[in-house]
Amino acid sequence: MKIANLENKIFKNKFPFHIIIFLLPAVFIYSLFMIYPLVDTIRFSTFYPNDANQLEFVGLDNYFTLLGDSEWSSSFWNALYNNFILFVVHMLVQNPIGLLLAALLSLPVVKGRNFYRTAIFMPTMMSVVIIGFTWQLILNPLWGVAEELMTYVGLEDYFQPWLGDDGSALITLSLISVWQWVGIPMMLIYAALLNIPEDLTEAAEIDGANHMQIFWRIKLPLILPTLGIVSVLTFVANFNAFDLIYAVKGALAGPNFSTDIMGTFFYRVFFGFQLQIGDPNMGATVATSMFLIILLGIIFYLYIIQRRLHRYAF
Amino acid sequence: MVKASHKLRRPLGGIGVQIILFAYMILALWPIFLVISNSFKSRKAIFNDPMALPTFDTFSLVGFEKVLTRSSFDLYFLNSITIMVATLAITLLIASMAAWALSEYKFRGNTLLGLYLAIGIMIPIRLGSVSILKLIVSLGLTNTLTALILVYVAQSLPLTIFILNEFMHQIPKDLKEAARCDGVSEYRIFFQIILPLTRPAIATVGIFTMVPVWNDLWFPLILSPGEETRTVTLGVQQFVGQYVTDWNAVLASLTLAIIPIMIVYLIFSRQLIRGITSGAVK
Amino acid sequence: MANIKLHAVRKSYGDTVVIHGVDIDIKDGEFCVFVGPSGCGKSTLLRMIAGLEEITAGDIEIGNIKVNDLPPSQRGIAMVFQSYALYPHMNVFKNMAFGLSIKKIGKAEIKQRVEKAANILQLGELLHRKPAELSGGQRQRVAIGRAIVRDPQVFLFDEPLSNLDAALRVQTRIEISKLHQNLKNTVVYVTHDQVEAMTLADKIIVLNDGYVEQIGKPLELYNKPENLFVAGFIGSPKMNFLNPKIYTNFDNNIATIGIRPEHLIESKNADFIITGKVDAVERLGDVSYIYLTSQDDTQIIAATSGSSDVKTGQSVTYGANSDKLHLFDINGKRSN
């Protein structure tokens, strides 16, 4: 009798209120403050105030303005191009350095690897704002720290106020960002390398492979999925970046917009700057463009890259 | 597994590897160290010899005095801590409830809901800012900490649910089934059996979601830029922008922002690194 | 082909000594099994022969060449790992060819050698599959194939059967034995399973706590275990150990009497008599194991014929002839 009751309680058609109660708070807050704003932003990008200052559905007009109007489109393409440079620098500098550090850390001969790991990851924990200011001070010719350091190695003639120069500001900022975030690829790759059973490297050793061959022919192919994830994380983070440029260069992303990326462009359009007033609808249009770019990146990763990478269970 | 270093395996560059790692470590720590060390020096000493450590002659706390008198750093700290604690508590509670529901109960749309909740892992919440601001305005929450807390909870939920979901799959079935056979209600199973068991995962999750919250500049800037609700990160940004030529003050404000996060990191680095290396984020 | 000599080989991690000065001589073509409980140092010893583990002191020679400082690949060995250690991203062919391609051997020769090994192990059909697509037994054969392709002087096996189910284990055991008869290479084989050791070995080396307890042919170990450890380790069910104090006809220096369960017979007229009460009977068909408590409260197992009608609770008398008794002194050393 008792058992039958219990079964009734669990299995019979009692409406599962508890499931709803468990899910409701999270789904509600997440939907209201994350999903709804994303969807509403997309919707909002298809509206524009008319002469009577009333919002009016304009279809894709805002996008035509963004890409067609010469002033808008030059800013847009400039920001996108700069953003792309930022991403390329991360892919070519941050991730290879992360891979190298992870590979070195995972070597059995290294002593004190926890110590190195903790130290190298430290900048990653800091606020981008702090890191930006720190490097701004270091590279400031007034203080002369960078110049003095270069004097030690006889390179003082090559010192430039890199952050102030059109041609080098973006690359310099990208490298500062690389310096800060290299801990992430390092950690993820390090974790993947640790995951490779020691038997495999020993088998390769018996097969006569040296350290380099073991790395290139055994370890690297096995961590490709992690490299894929690192790349897509880098992509999303870069096309969503804002703080560093804003902290170091302000909303105008100077000099001469040479460090303007999608995040700062979005901010200026949305909130306005100097004499121009903010434009939420065009802001939503820029945000939606960023959303589409990031979405394209993720889709490219999921359907083109990830499908070719095998994840091996050890 | 402990293994003695192997004579035969030691590459020629065993020392070389150590040197490269050491050099990179210096590169990673030196800028932070430079800021902290100079923040304790007089203006003259900062410029005369930036590399030198503060000495008895050059030691000065003038920068910190300026920061503390000209801005309300104590308030900023209080704000940041309030936001972080509230966000962490709410996120952990409702995320573990949701993760439990997703991992434990089979219901129609379970997988779909899981995917829906995972969107936010990849898509940055920042892209919805235009509407978030409208929403916050219409709720009358501008320039409140509540606005930031709500947004940060929404931002932290997806990854937290994801990590906790993986974790809850590992909780042995017998535990909850034994409880069910005793006729314990589903709520009590969750609050008295499951929630205490998730404690190990909570440290990892806490660090993963809280560091971005503490460091965020964007939402304080657009939702709560007022003096009363300013966070440390925004406070430093504004302060440095305002006193950019006062090096003592700038260095001191940076140091004030660096030290707490550094201490927290050094305390929790073990959990954080374990979290990453055990594959909590994949 | 090569012999292997270990001379005073020691291994320690800091202050912890895991191998205490071991001397072993393995003849060319011999199938030598290291057996012992887990943690006895047998795998460490094998890994030292392979060159995966540094030698703290002593010398290892393979084919009369001192290999202490040679890397694994130059020792003329091939190893089959417990986990098989197949490269998961390479197909069977590439797994087997990897070592050869590192040696920069020509494509045609690699192909010919891999196919030859694949034929021996009936892997022909599987050459293009990845390890994940193979069954446990197939993976095991690929691991052996990878070793054969290297054409080594010495095969090293590290518990190769422990990941297989019982039926496959027996089958593979026989295959490994046949393989050795055909190839005639020297083999060093590590296992914790004394049945594997008894069935495969030309020579068994029993290890315990980093010491060699006994070296000998399988039946020597069974018939004349040199000490208590070997006596207890070889043979299943375990040898019974009795205290000689309650028996009158033993020297004072005898501390333990050993008698194998299968040597106990239901007889009151034997040289040595045990009486006791039956606690349990396990009937396996061909044989029945009688668990009894003897008059001095020792737990005894007797293996009797399957047709025995002994019942639980019954009082029984078992005996053994004195030539079946193993006598050990106070240090656990054999003294008969």
Image (cartoon, rainbow, N blue to C red):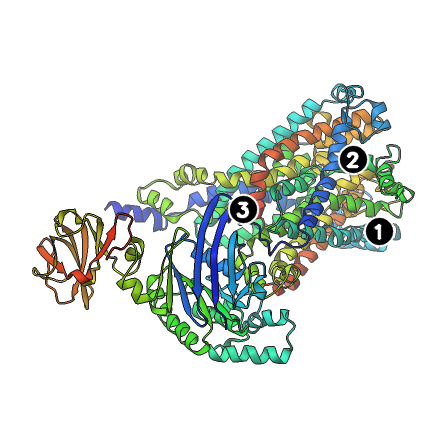
Residue B65 rendering spot, x and y as whole percentages: 76, 19
Q: Nearer the viewer, residue C30 or C189?
A: C30
Residue type at the position of mark 1? Asn
Residue A53 visible to the viewer: no
Q: How crowded is mark 2: few (under 14 residues within 10 Å), some or many (20 or more)?
A: many
- What's the chain of the residue with tag 1? A
Label 3 SS: helix
Q: Which residue is drawn at 80% across and 41% down?
A: A268
Asked if disc 3 and disc 1 are in contact, CB closer than 8 Å, the reply is no
Q: Mark 1 points at which residue?
A: A78
Residue type at the position of mark 2? Phe
- What's the chain of the residue with tag 2? A
Question: In 3D space, how far apart are the residues under numbered discs 2 and 1 (Cα atoms)?
Answer: 24 Å
Label 2 SS: helix
Q: Earlier in the sequence, mark 2 or mark 1?
A: 1
Label 1 SS: helix
Residue B153 rendering spot, x and y as whole percentages: 59, 38
Q: Mark 2 points at which residue?
A: A133
Q: Name the residue under label 3.
A: B163
> Are discs 3 and 1 both within one chain?
no
Asked if disc 2 and disc 1 are in contact, CB closer than 8 Å, the reply is no
Residue type at the position of mark 3? Ile
Q: How crowded is mark 1: few (under 14 residues within 10 Å), some or many (20 or more)?
A: some
Q: Quadrant of residue A217?
A: bottom right
Residue A202 rendering spot, x and y as whole percentages: 55, 60
